[in-house]
Image (cartoon, rainbow, N blue to C red):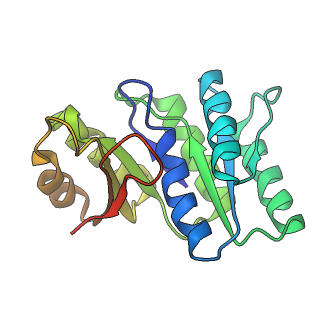
Amino acid sequence: ALAKSRTWRGLTTTTGKPAKRLLAERHKPLMVAADIKRPAAIDQLETLGKQLGIPVFSDRKSPDAVDICRRACAHAMEMMADIVILDTAGRLHIDEEMMSELEQVAAFVSPHEILLVVDSMTGQDAVRVAEDFNKRLDLTGVILTKLDGDARGGAALSVKQVTGAPIVFCGVGETADKFEQFR
């Protein structure tokens, strides 16, 4: 499951980056468009899936992210996908409705990993968001995006400190191949 902190368009593309890496490692990933708060995210993930040759499960009519994730997991079994990546709602300012939805998805899916995607350019806001998400979802890792820009990654040390979760990957560009293991 990927929970995103979003300040502007672009973090949905991060869902495709680990999916592409997993595909190259001979896995069969399924990406799930579970960000029902932002219909453009569904379009974006479907377009990305087509570009990468990775299937995407989506349902524009369902107002229930938990139901979408439930059906996506059943679909993943039918298609024999071995990894399901959930692109869930996220925003810079945490709200109770979104967090409750994410907790329900996590409770139903019981994910092996919960990765928070944070924009490295948001600085201390990224730290606050990471701390709030970790309190509610017990993060297993963090993905920092936009480390190719003017950001120096100063939030990285603080995010690691407040969550205890390792920074596992970083985005260093817009395209799906601009994704590296964080060292």
Q: In the picture, residue 107 is in which quadrant? A: bottom right
Residue 150 position in % (x across, y down):
14, 35
Farthest residue toward the bottom? Answer: 26
The residue positioned 47% from the left and 34% from the top of the image is 90
**Residue 114 sits above or below residue 16 on the image:** below
Which quarter of the rendered picture does the N terminus lie within?
A: bottom right
Residue 47 position in % (x across, y down):
66, 35
47 vs 175, left or right, is right
In front: 63, or 56? 56
Report the number of discs: 0
**Residue 141 sits above or below residue 154 on the image:** below
Farthest residue toward the right? Answer: 78
60 vs 95, left or right, is right
In front: 84, or 111? 84
Residue 95 position in % (x across, y down):
43, 28
The residue positioned 50% from the left and 66% from the top of the image is 113
Residue 122 position in % (x across, y down):
22, 32
In front: 6, or 108? 6
Q: In the picture, residue 146 is in which quadrant? A: top left
144 vs 34, left or right, is left
